[in-house]
Amino acid sequence: MLAGWKAYPWGYSEEMKRAGVGALVGLAGCAQAALPLAPSAADGGEPQRILVRFAETTSTADRASLREKCRAVAAPGALPDREVWTLPAGTERADLVSRLRGAPELRYAAAEGRRTLQVAPGGGRTVLGFTAADRDLDDNGYFTQTGVLAAWARFEPTRPPGTGILVAVVASGVDVRHPELAHAIARDAQGAPRYIDAFADSGKSDTNSQGTYNWATAYQSASYPGPDGHGSGTRESGIIAASASAQPAGSYDMVGIAPGAQILPVKVLDVGGDGDDAIIMRGIVAAADAGADIVLLPFGGPEPSAALDDAVWYARSKGVLVVAAAGQYPEKVFFPAASPGALAIGAVDGKDEYMSYASTGPELALVAPGGTVDESRTGLLGPVPTYLSTTRYPGKYVAKNYSRVSGTSEAAAFAAGIAALVWSAEPDLDAGQVRQRLLAGATDLGQAGFDDKTGFGRIDAARSLAIGGHANGAP
């Protein structure tokens, strides 16, 4: 039984149509001859990367010929027939991708994009003005607002919400030793933490520096696998599955929405909270192959990506529910949240008011509490690494292991926690059915029915469970 858990007094829409993926649109040909590779001011003279997917019928010889014509150095992609091409410095990358349109050898080619965490402007600083009120498990009333407390009452104390559900937090890594999270980290048969480091798998290391402080040193100081050099992955894991450990002294006894869930750390973002599409695709695919039930993607970017569409749909094909941050740019849902099959999550405050920092658009599915931008106590509470990181550095917040942050990254983590809660109550559901429960159980906001600001409404755990008619919540 988890400490903290036992102490709590338990007592066919347009969006769904978008869940189907039609034929991939090929960016479709360097087919006639080697393309001119003049230096590009836009590309800064640095080596450029593009992501390609070959047609299944393309022979090995034809693949090699196309690489040679494009002067590409190829590395294997995350899935069969996919490759990451590094091009010579000065390559006109956009021109090359344009010329590859219609190449019979390819399903698609795309310039590699870069994604970043979706933290609210002005709401991204770590806020640690804790008071006694922070010990309240219903932090800022968000659990009451979203029916989490009512849903908890349906579970037995020995079987916490989230039990049996594996949530892959695809972000900056996770501090697997944090006292609020140690119980929740998925482990192998020997009891060692399970983790996926897509950085290492891609031949890269998270060693950049920021300002006058060497973040590489902080990253390398962690003596266990998968350190979180930024802090976001640890925070989002806590929103989902913190244990209310109250240990060691000075901790704040916070609890996640689904404290029985297991967390699979997947590192795809660097210490700055940024990541490249090829590494992100590798992380999503690896999480799906590792048996994740839910994949959280708390990052995004405005550029469409056939490769990320590919990865999201691969996860869906493996029975995974993909939950993604809608973004921080009004009037445009970012990718991969806008990828077909992803559940795009926007943000509201504790009064169900739309947050102006959150992305809007027809791809938006639901909204969840994301905190405000006034740097008050309304940001979502979550743990940060117990070692030095972007959110914990010398001279600032060194004595505390928690933070408050607002954004659609946090709202998406909140939604992933509710999805884990609902799925654990009815483990015979599949990912599509859980998705439909969340959509059907949402509290409609704004104009009646779907709207671009709040999607199908604000997520609600109790209403989603009620649709199934389960009185006890446990199988």
Image (cartoon, rainbow, N blue to C red):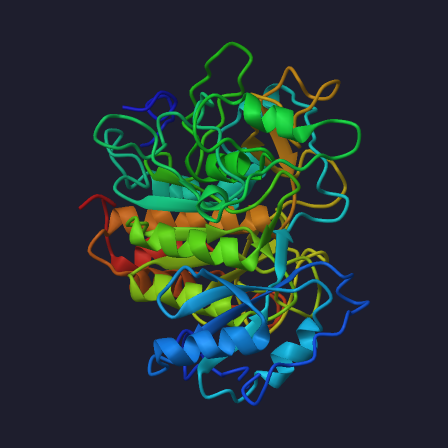
In the depicted structure, whether residue 253 falls above or below residue 53: above
Name the residue rendered at 36%, 57% in the picture.
Answer: 464
Residue 463: which quarter of the image? bottom left
For the image, the number of numbered tags is 0
Across and down, in percent, residue 128 comes to 68, 25
Across and down, in percent, residue 35 comes to 64, 81
Indicate the quadrant containing the N terminus: top left, top right, bottom left or bottom right.
top left
Across and down, in percent, residue 60 comes to 36, 75
Q: Quick check: 172 left or right of 356?
A: left
Across and down, in percent, residue 312 comes to 43, 64
Residue 395 visible here:
yes
Q: Quick check: 131 left or right of 74?
A: right
Residue 339 visible here:
no
Which residue is nearer to you in this view: 399 or 95?
95
Name the residue rendered at 77%, 41% in the picture.
Answer: 374
Q: Residue reaching furthest top?
A: 249
Residue 396: which quarter of the image? top right
